[in-house]
């Protein structure tokens, strides 16, 4: 685990970033409060529709250090969900059949030593399980080489980041050599049937903008990706998710250091879409941190914004109370409500 000093340093940095976002100020620039936008849309307070998705961050350790990572994941992160906390998650899922989807994320979730045990236990509950795989983990060590077969055996839906279908843009965002390894991993997944018509094995890719701009049309991007990847590498996949970079953690650092913070936030505010706001993922999702604490979404989790109400930890999970809570919002929420909207499943409109 991280030292106490390192943990305090990380939390101090997160709260400093939150203060910048919440005050919405940099120099003379000031943002319209996100709450005001929701009020104008008749959506405040923002409340759940019904919690159906159980998203679990099982650790911040990762074999990569991506520039846009809102988790600030990397090889030096040692926060890992314990088997005891995983068992508490399983207990909750056993008692709450309305939680139909379990979405496993990280870091690289596969680096948690209890990852496979957890997946097998979840499948015994007949849950739809999604694993957010960074692709390169498959080639990082021989102990991961069989991941495509493991995923297939348990009918896992695989969601993988591929910021672009060219080497230069992907490597600039994720590191040298990442694109080539990602292509090899995708070919391995295709070989066992992932993304191939008629197999039922779902392989979805994720696009993230490489700079201070919003994603283009998800459907148009998907067509470009499919055409380029099949022509150049023989790779097939099911869907592309276009996800907006939220102004937190490493991406916020980039915005501030590059002088793009004000212009980017203005873009988000000006692109606010009330239809997207009505369909944000926090309305049907609960996010569980590596230590078992509960959050409205993965982004609030990274800002240490624990959800409202008494049910704040997995051991105190109360689905009825969670469905009645008010969702905690902040200026970073503009990222999920701009344009076609953004969620872990891509556009929401």
Image (tube, helix red, strand yellow):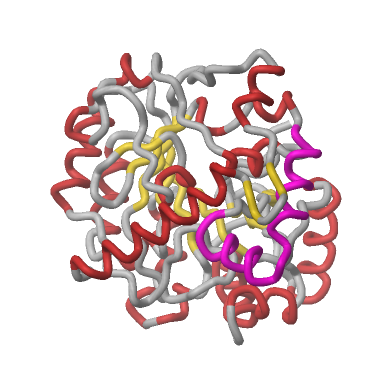
Instruction: Identify the residue shown where x is 69% and y is 58%.
Output: 261
Furthest-left residue in view?
84
Is 328 situated above or below 291?
Answer: above
Q: Is residue 194 left or right of residue 209?
A: left
Q: As rendered, which of 252 and 58 lies closer to the eye?
A: 252
Q: Is residue 280 magenta?
A: no
Q: Is residue 99 left or right of residue 49?
A: left
Q: As rendered, which of 193 and 344 lies closer to the eye?
A: 344
Image x and y of residue 29, in percent = 72, 49
Image x and y of residue 235, in percent = 70, 67
Is 267 situated above or below 17?
Answer: above
Q: Is residue 255 magenta?
A: yes
Furthest-bottom residue in view?
176
Image x and y of residue 153, in percent = 39, 55
Is 302 situated above or below 53?
Answer: below
Instruction: Identify the residue shown where x is 32% and y is 47%.
Output: 289
Residue 278 occupies which quadrant of the picture?
top right
Instruction: Identify the residue shown where x is 39% and y is 19%.
Output: 325
Span highlighted in magenta in the image: 248-272
Is 276 situated above or below 326?
Answer: below
Residue 255 occupies which quadrant of the picture?
bottom right
- Count every numbered label the image shows and give the total: 0
Q: Is residue 134 left or right of residue 143?
A: right
Q: As rendered, which of 156 and 83 lies closer to the eye?
A: 83
Instruction: Identify the residue shown where x is 34% and y is 37%.
Output: 306
**Dominant secondary structure (helix, strand or loop) of the stretch shown in magenta:** helix
On-image quarter of the N terminus: bottom left
């Amino acid at each position: 685990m991280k030292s106490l000093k390192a943990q305090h340093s990380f939390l101090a940095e997160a709260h400093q970033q939150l203060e910048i976002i919440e005050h919405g100020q940099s120099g003379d620039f000031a943002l319209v409060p996100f709450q005001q936008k929701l009020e104008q849309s008749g959506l405040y307070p923002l409340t759940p529709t019904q919690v159906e998705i159980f998203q679990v961050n099982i650790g911040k350790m990762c074999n990569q250090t991506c520039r846009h990572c809102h988790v600030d994941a990397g090889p030096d992160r040692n926060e890992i969900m314990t088997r005891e906390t995983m068992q508490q998650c399983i207990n909750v899922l056993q008692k709450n059949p309305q939680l139909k989807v379990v979405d496993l994320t990280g870091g690289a979730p596969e680096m948690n030593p209890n990852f496979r045990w957890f997946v097998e236990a979840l499948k015994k509950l007949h849950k739809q399980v999604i694993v957010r795989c960074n692709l390169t983990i498959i080639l990082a060590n021989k102990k991961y080489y069989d991941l495509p077969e493991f995923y297939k055996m348990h009918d896992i839906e695989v969601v993988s980041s591929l910021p672009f279908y060219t080497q230069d843009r992907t490597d600039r965002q994720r590191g040298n050599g990442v694109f080539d390894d990602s292509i090899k991993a995708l070919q391995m997944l295709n070989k066992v049937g992932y993304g191939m018509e008629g197999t039922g094995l779902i392989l979805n890719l994720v696009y993230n903008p490489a700079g201070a701009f919003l994603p283009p049309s998800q459907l148009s991007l998907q067509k470009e990706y499919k055409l380029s990847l099949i022509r150049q590498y023989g790779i097939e996949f099911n869907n592309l998710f276009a996800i907006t970079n939220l102004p937190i953690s490493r991406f916020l650092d980039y915005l501030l250091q590059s002088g793009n913070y004000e212009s980017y936030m203005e873009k988000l505010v000006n692109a606010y879409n009330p239809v997207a706001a009505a369909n944000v993922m926090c309305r049907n999702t609960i996010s569980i941190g590596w230590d078992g604490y509960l959050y409205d979404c993965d982004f609030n989790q990274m800002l240490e914004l624990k959800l409202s109400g008494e049910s704040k930890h997995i051991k105190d999970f109360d689905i009825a109370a969670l469905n009645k809570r008010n969702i905690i919002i902040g200026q970073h929420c503009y990222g999920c409500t701009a344009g076609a909207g953004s969620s872990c499943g891509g556009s929401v409109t």
